[in-house]
Image (cartoon, helix red, strand yellow):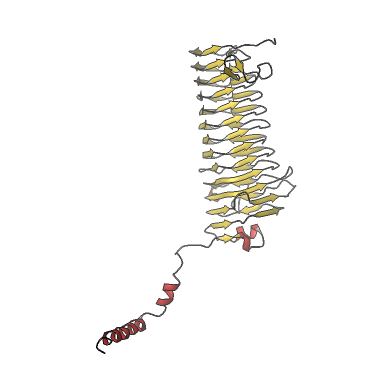
Amino acid sequence: MRRTLPFAALGLIACAFFALRAPGQANQAASPQKLPGARPVVEAIDYPSLQAAIDAVPAEGGVVRLPPGKFEIAEPLVISRGDVLLAGSGPATHIVNTNTAGESALVIRHPDFNADKPDRKLNLWRIQVADLQITGNEKSGHGIEAHGINEIFIHGVTVSRHGTHGILLDYCYEDPRVSDSLITYNKQSGLEIVGCHDIVVCGNHFEENLDALRCLDAYNLCMSGNNIDDHLRHGVVIENTYGSVVSGNMIEECQDTGIILDRDCYGITISANVIAHEMKCGIDLRDAHGCAVTGNSFPLVHHRAVVIGKESGRIPVVGNAFSDSYIGTAQTKRPQLNDPAGGLVIEGSNVTAVANTFSGLATKAVEKAEGAEDIVVELNIDVDNGPKKAP
């Protein structure tokens, strides 16, 4: 009996303790409170349409998660508030624009946006589109059309077969980024950038658009690590833009020109790219000053690998390889008569061409136009260049 008294006493103390606890404490232990400030994710599968799911995002922003599936739309989906992530389930989330009146698949802009009177005070901030597929048709508009969105981020997106641009970034001024996306078969530019600043375009695939990328009236483009293949006109077109770098890209088989700089470009570096098998020209500096062309390879660029136009000047061309398909032991992969390679053409002034290798070309290594002044051509390798006759 003496051994059981302490246990009985402990039981009475425990009952008293639980009786004195504040009401609801036991329930709190079983059902903890939600994280303060958290907003629920909008699951599009629970809504009657994709637009209804997007509209369910609160004014403060949030996440719309799209399930796998094929979703046909006949009018644009519209995101009109900031701090939004529209996220799919990879390519299994497939948005198909069936519109044939030139309307886009996804439009991102402030609800009061007016194209005729753009107002930066109406810019939205921080919108991401990720991990989905958007396709159109020959009569549809753009795939993704964004106006006045600061810090827009598009990644992991497939944008294909639209009647105009794959992606249009219109005065998305602060820090636009497009990365790790597949942008193909669009009737105009794969990516059209207008009036943007501090731009990153990295690790994308562009194929068989009219042009891969056009960057107009912009600042500080950083374009690296992209694969650009089989374009129906040009690869990269940069106009009225300064302080930029185009580096480490593969640009192949454009029907016209690989890279164009035009309309008062300056302070741009084009470096460490492979620019291969372009039909008319590799790099065309039409109106560019203080721009460097360094460390690029130009295998089998037809006619002219690099042109420095008469409106361009103060250009160093250093450490590049201009070549045919020579692989050693007097062998070439592709005969020159069927696949000629071109060299450097200088029409502008104040140009330095130093430490380049020119080999196996169907043209002269360097051609200087009449009127080109202050040209330095030194320390280059010039071997086996000039027209070849059929045996």
Residue 347 x/y as whole percent: 59, 16
Q: Nearer the viewer, residue 11 or 108?
A: 11
Q: Residue at x 44, y 76 (%)?
A: 27
Residue 354 x/y as whole percent: 49, 16
Residue 211 x/y as whole percent: 65, 34
Task: Tell me, yes or no, if residue 117 can be seen here.
Answer: no
> Most extreme residue toward the bottom, as rendered?
1
Task: Tell me, yes or no, if residue 297 can be seen here.
Answer: yes
Q: Nearer the viewer, residue 136 or 381?
A: 381
Image position of 36 with respect to 311: above or below: below
Is 367 positioned to the left or the right of 185 in the image?
left
Q: Residue at x 54, y 54 (%)?
A: 84
Q: Nearer the viewer, residue 347 or 1?
A: 1
Is 84 positioned to the left or the right of 254 in the image?
left
Q: How many marks?
A: 0
Q: Residue at x 63, y 55 (%)?
A: 68
> Most extreme residue toward the left, as rendered?
2
Residue 259 x/y as whole percent: 59, 28
Q: Work out which quarter of the rendered image holds the N terminus and state it.
A: bottom left
Q: Work out which quarter of the rendered image holds the C terminus and state it.
A: top right
Q: Nearer the viewer, residue 145 or 38?
A: 38
Q: Residue at x 60, y 31 (%)?
A: 237
